[in-house]
Image (cartoon, helix red, strand yellow):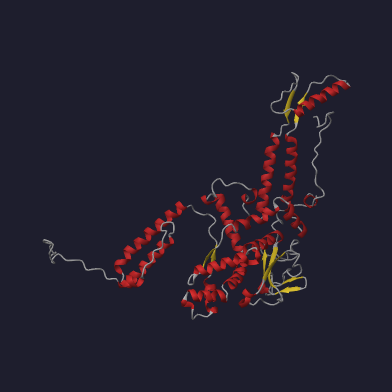
Amino acid sequence: MSGNNEEGGAATLGVSMGNNSPLMKILMAEDIQPGDSPSYELCKTILAFHPIGAKMVDAPIKKAQSQKRTIKIPGGPEKDLIKAFEKEWEQTGSIGADKVIANVMRTSRAYGAGSVVAGALDFPTDEPLPMDRLHELDLYYNVLDPLNTAGSLVLNQDPNAPDFQKPQHIRVGKADYHPSRAVVMLNEQPIYIEWSNSAFGFVGRSVYQRALYPLKSFVQSMITDNAILEKAMLLVMKMQSPGAVIDQQSRAWFGFKRQALKGAKTGNVISIGVNESIESIDLKNVRDAAEFARNNVLKNIATSDNMPASLINQETLAEGFGEGTEDAKVIAEYIAEFRKSMAPIYRFFDNIVMRRAWNPDFYASIQRKYPGYADTPYETAFYEWKNAFEAEWPNLLVEPDSEKAKVDDIVMKAAIAIVEVLSPMLDPESKADLALWLADIMNERELMFSAPLELDREAIANYVPPTPMTESEPEPMVESGRT
């Protein structure tokens, strides 16, 4: 086979191994074997440089936060409370609470443990923040990785201790943080006396721990891709040999023909001998093997963290995500469990945001707007709202409006049937309650009814239907305009 020089020669595979890059230095090392545990530095390298590293960490977080939580606060001025809460939520930490939470979860998944601490200017870190004055403080939030908290999150391994394998204390340098103003997120639960090199403690594990070897294999697949691309444009020209001895003029003629082939483009004409031919290198046998190996590597990476492979290999679902395909259902179930794992850090920020959003100044405006709160103390109203606060994640499998309308129609028919059966047997007070119940059912069907139905319970309960006329009573006659 001729090489890519005019004089011919042996072909060589000239793929640069990039030995100076951190990723190639570490992942292409011969001593990485299946089951090896990654160090803190290796996890940072994979997160920063590996093509799958960031996606493996971020994909479930982005999918989980792709929808906003549905907030309900029954029993209070709901719209005002939700508006104030969401406004403060978006301003938390200057970048929004969702972004802070995503950064903590990212650190936790990459290293096995991640933390966030709430601080206030000119306020000691080892003291709890005054919850009743949070709206007066200039708060900041720092996301810490295991190197920042090294030594304080080792976790107690005494099975008889109250803090057995539970994070209790965060120390950063010489600063101790009160437990009430910090939250620690572990990726997976700690295993007894199982040290995590990436997190410097007996804590959770990095998502890269079980995936280390296939992550190394993925880098090799990239090298394979590069080698195939370099050879994809290679043309092989079969030329008839002029004889045993090639003089200088023959050598120049063969070089001229190779140059003519190299410069030929669409629309040009090139002439070759009758017994000569030009072919591209046959890579058909490489394709199946390379694709098979690469797909298996991606599946192994996904399996290592028990995540659906479609989250990291960018496969397009056969149907829309809301159509309920099997792949979509698997992803929805995985994300639903992942959202549960984020509950502690969301609860941490919910409590802070509620205090800052529903502060005494906000309550004063509520008292002016709703006179019913005029005699209610601030703390009483706040804890009523806090206890009634509900935040739920919507279903990731969103039904189309046509399917929702069908469900609403079935619900309405069932509700009307209940009213028709019970109404003749009820007293006026119960009938009024039943009418209000039906109105609530109707008002929840926003796709069917654009305007809410509002009924007066007192008027319904006191309503007396007119007495129907009997046959014995003569009907009034009209004659010449007189009765």
Q: How many marks?
A: 0
- Whether residue 304 is visible here, answered yes or no, is no
**Where is residue 377 drawn, in percent x and y?**
52, 80
| Residue at 73% over, 74% down | 176
If the image is split into quadrants, where does the C terminus sit? Answer: bottom left
Tell me where residue 272 appears, x and y as whole percent: 75, 21
Please tell me which residue is depicted at 31% across the width and 70% down the height of the picture: 426
Observer-nearest of 366 and 89: 366
Indicate whether 299 appears above or below 266: below
| Nearer-the-camera pick, 266 or 6 | 266
- Seen in the picture, residue 277 relative to 483 is either above or below; the reply is above
Q: In this image, 429 relative to 445: left or right?
A: left
Query: Foreground residue, 138 or 127?
Result: 138
Q: Quadrant of residue 130?
A: bottom right
Quadrant of the image occupied by residue 164: bottom right
Q: Position of residue 284 (x, y in %)?
A: 69, 34
| Residue at the limit of the structure toward the left, as seen here | 479
Quarter of the image holding residue 271? top right
Q: In the image, 471: left or right of 172?
A: left
- Image coordinates of residue 204 in percent, x first then y, are 69, 63
Q: Residue at x 65, y 52 (%)?
A: 303
**Residue 132 visible to an observer of this rendering:** yes
- Vertical comparison of 391 with 323: above or below: below
